[in-house]
């Protein structure tokens, strides 16, 4: 990083006590060096990035960063704080702060700086040397020299330069690392594997599949490798390259925490001749068996979540368009003629009909997309054709949400079964484009039309009728259950099951009263956790960290917009107090919403679609009641904990935890 950092950009005696003050102190050095043209504008961009997700890393590290139009060239400023500054890391304050500034639009520069820094922070000697540096020049030289070392060794998997053949050695490994954001964990895993390989005398070449793309391993390197390590949380691109090699397939964190074990496992598989054949290869991260605890139940949950995650954008787009259509043209707009035959530019009803019909088209994809991507999660791309076909049949026979789940699971199972059949090499070329789609679609279509489709459709009809008959106590109990589910994991699998159940009920031409009440209940309960946390940080801010108080400001908007994930930062920091409080509030809101008989035709939007709610005043009262319950409980529980800590400290204040050594555990929470 010789061009990114100079001694003038280093402050070894950073006196700031907050992350905002620390960012300003370092930004002032960038401005003085002519690398930032507008100090306040740049700091606003840094703060905006910080609001998205805390930039603290375990081990006493803070890496505030942003892309900004006020930056003239990619730059890095470094500060060392004696007392530590809270950047939101789980293990406490940071004493090493790196402020990364990249020009607007310079994605590659931004990612390069972040990824290189992430790799360096995996080296305990690097952070120890920075903590011991006596002068600014020494610290700048340490960072610059470390980056120069990385640039000189492109074959170690940093994604830069050409891949050359490794030297002759007793054992050769190729590896691929990737994580969902494609920045910190990706490069930390690569660095960890490379360091362990060096200690073990193993020749290793790592391909980092990050956000900025990836440099493919040369075919010669792959051919010469004795084993393969795939450390990934997203699908490895062009995975077929490694077929026929002994393969260790794990999550990216395993490569960070136990690289030596992975190398030993790879060596053992090579010694035993355990190779991965094309038909036996785990095809997606969701079908791995390499991680501890990745049993069938876990894989099933991931398959279903894959389908739901792809379905939700269709729900949001289609549902909000339909909601807008009702708001403009009234509920009778569902009987309007096709806008392809009749559309008047100056009539509001024509625009309402247009929105309704576009939204209806989007809603028509819900079940096929759900089924198709469940099958994709199980069997990769070959599962898409039978999955979509099965989902479309589920719609045709009125099997609904349950039919979509069954079609997706059937399609994935059928494709996985076909892929296990040994076939002559001459036929492998036509398998993915002809044989697998033909056979799997025919089998799934037969099963859905003739075998399982009708019973599932009858079960769906029975469930709908049962919900329609719910009243009084039974309806309230259903509201309690839905409220608990929505607040249990804040956007996780349980939350998504409740949400998908509700949206599936209104994704029909004429939804029942019960379906509309369920949709209202689910949305109301989902708003409670972030609103409750936002209110708690407002009324009793001293119980929360500065970072949590900042997150509380954003939680007002997220909660009002029906984004339950706005409460995740609070739940992650204190799950035993936050999650039960959120569930209690959600249960109260769910019960009240069902008791009031509130209805909703829009699957998303939060308070912004209240005009479309039946009994809107009662609906808002239910949300407010649940929010107050959550706030009261979390304040009481946190207040009791704070009082206990004060008594243990004996001085009325909680002691700040000391930064942990980087080598103990480095978890990257920062994303570009």
Image (cartoon, rainbow, N blue to C red):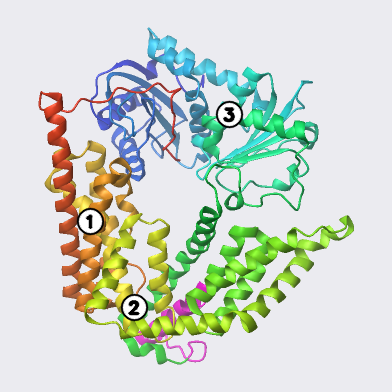
SS for callout 3: helix
**Residue 151 marker:** none
Gap in angstroms between the C-alphas marked 3 and 2:
51 Å
Q: Answer whether residue 340 is magenta in the image.
A: yes
Horizontal arrangement in the rendering, residue 147 relative to residue 521 (left or right): right
Q: Nearer the viewer, mark 3 or mark 2?
A: 3
SS for callout 1: helix
Q: Which one is earlier in the sequence, the residue at label 3 or at label 1?
A: 3
Magenta part, dominant SS = helix
Per the image, the residue denoted by label 1 is 531
Place residue 206 in its image quadrant. top right
529 lies above or below 267: below
117 lies above or below 600: above
Horizontal arrangement in the rendering, residue 51 relative to residue 387 (left or right): left
The residue stretch that appears in magenta: 338-367
Going by the picture, which residue comes out furthest to the top?
134
125 lies above or below 381: above
**Residue 259 marker:** 3
Residue neighbourhood size for the residue with mark 2, other residues' Cα within 10 Å, grouped as few (<14), some (14–19), many (≥20): many
Horizontal arrangement in the rendering, residue 430 relative to residue 123 (left or right): right
Q: Answer whether residue 370 is magenta in the image.
A: no
Residue 200: percent from left, percent from top: 65, 19
Residue neighbourhood size for the residue with mark 3, other residues' Cα within 10 Å, grouped as few (<14), some (14–19), many (≥20): many
Gap in angstroms between the C-alphas marked 3 and 1:
42 Å
Camera-side residue of 239 and 131:
239
**Residue 601 marker:** 2
Q: Residue at x 47, y 30 (%)?
A: 74
């Amino acid at each position: 990083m010789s061009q990114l950092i100079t001694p003038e950009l280093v402050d070894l005696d950073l006196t700031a006590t907050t992350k905002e003050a620390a960012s300003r102190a370092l930004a002032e050095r960038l401005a003085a060096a002519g690398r930032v043209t507008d100090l306040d504008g740049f700091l606003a961009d840094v703060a905006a990035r910080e609001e998205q997700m805390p930039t603290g890393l375990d081990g006493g590290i803070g890496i505030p960063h942003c892309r900004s139009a006020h930056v003239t060239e990619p730059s890095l400023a470094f500060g060392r704080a004696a007392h530590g500054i809270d950047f939101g890391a789980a293990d406490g304050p940071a004493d090493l702060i790196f402020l990364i500034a990249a020009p607007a639009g310079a994605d590659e520069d931004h990612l390069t700086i972040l990824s290189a820094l992430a790799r360096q922070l995996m080296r305990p000697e690097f952070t120890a040397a920075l903590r011991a540096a006596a002068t600014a020049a020494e610290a700048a030289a340490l960072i610059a020299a470390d980056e120069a070392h990385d640039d000189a060794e492109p074959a170690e998997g940093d994604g830069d330069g050409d891949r050359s053949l490794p030297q002759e050695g007793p054992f050769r490994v190729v590896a691929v690392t990737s994580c969902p954001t494609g920045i910190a964990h990706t490069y930390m895993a690569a660095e960890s594997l490379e360091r362990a390989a060096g200690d073990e005398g193993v020749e290793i070449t790592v391909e980092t599949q990050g956000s900025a793309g990836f440099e493919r391993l040369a075919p010669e390197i792959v051919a010469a490798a004795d084993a393969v390590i795939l450390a990934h949380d997203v699908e490895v691109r062009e995975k077929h390259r490694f077929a026929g090699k002994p393969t260790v397939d794990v999550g990216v964190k395993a490569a960070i925490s136990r690289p030596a074990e992975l190398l030993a496992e790879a060596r053992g598989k090579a010694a035993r001749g355990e190779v991965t054949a094309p038909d036996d290869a785990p095809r997606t991260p969701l079908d791995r068996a390499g991680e501890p605890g990745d049993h069938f139940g876990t894989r099933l949950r991931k398959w279903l979540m894959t389908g739901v995650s792809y379905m939700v954008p269709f729900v949001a787009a289609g549902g909000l368009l339909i909601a807008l259509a009702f708001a403009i043209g009234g509920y009778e707009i569902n009987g309007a003629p096709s806008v392809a035959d009749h559309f008047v530019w100056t009539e509001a009803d024509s625009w309402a009909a247009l929105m309704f019909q576009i939204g209806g088209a989007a809603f028509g994809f819900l079940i096929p997309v759900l089924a198709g991507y469940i099958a994709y999660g199980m069997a990769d791309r070959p599962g898409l054709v039978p999955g979509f076909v099965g989902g479309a049949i589920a719609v045709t026979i009125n099997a609904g949400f349950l039919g979509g789940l069954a079609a997706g699971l059937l399609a994935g199972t059928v494709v996985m079964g076909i892929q296990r059949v040994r076939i002559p090499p001459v036929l492998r070329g036509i398998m993915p484009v002809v044989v697998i789609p033909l056979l799997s679609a025919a089998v799934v279509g037969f099963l859905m039309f003739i075998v399982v489709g009708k019973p599932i459709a009858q079960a769906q009809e029975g469930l709908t009728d049962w919900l329609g008959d719910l009243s009084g106590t039974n309806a309230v109990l259903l509201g309690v259950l839905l409220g608990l589910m929505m607040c249990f994991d804040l956007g996780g699998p349980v939350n998504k099951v409740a949400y998908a159940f509700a949206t599936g009920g209104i994704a029909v031409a004429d939804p029942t009263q019960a379906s509309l009440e369920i949709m209202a209940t689910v949305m109301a309960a989902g708003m409670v956790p972030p609103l409750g946390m936002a209110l708690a940080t407002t009324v009793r801010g001293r119980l929360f960290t500065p970072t949590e108080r900042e997150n509380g400001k954003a939680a007002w908007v997220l909660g009002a917009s029906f984004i339950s994930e706005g409460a995740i930062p609070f739940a992650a920091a204190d799950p035993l107090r936050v999650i039960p409080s959120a569930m209690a509030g959600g249960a109260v809101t769910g019960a009240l919403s069902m008791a009031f008989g509130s209805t909703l035709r829009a699957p998303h939007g939060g308070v912004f679609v209240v005009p479309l709610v039946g009994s809107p005043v009662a609906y808002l009262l239910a949300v407010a009641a649940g929010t107050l319950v959550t706030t009261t409980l979390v304040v009481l529980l946190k207040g009791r904990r704070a009082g206990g800590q004060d008594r243990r400290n004996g001085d009325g204040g909680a002691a700040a935890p000391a930064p942990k050594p980087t080598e103990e555990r480095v978890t990257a929470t920062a994303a570009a």
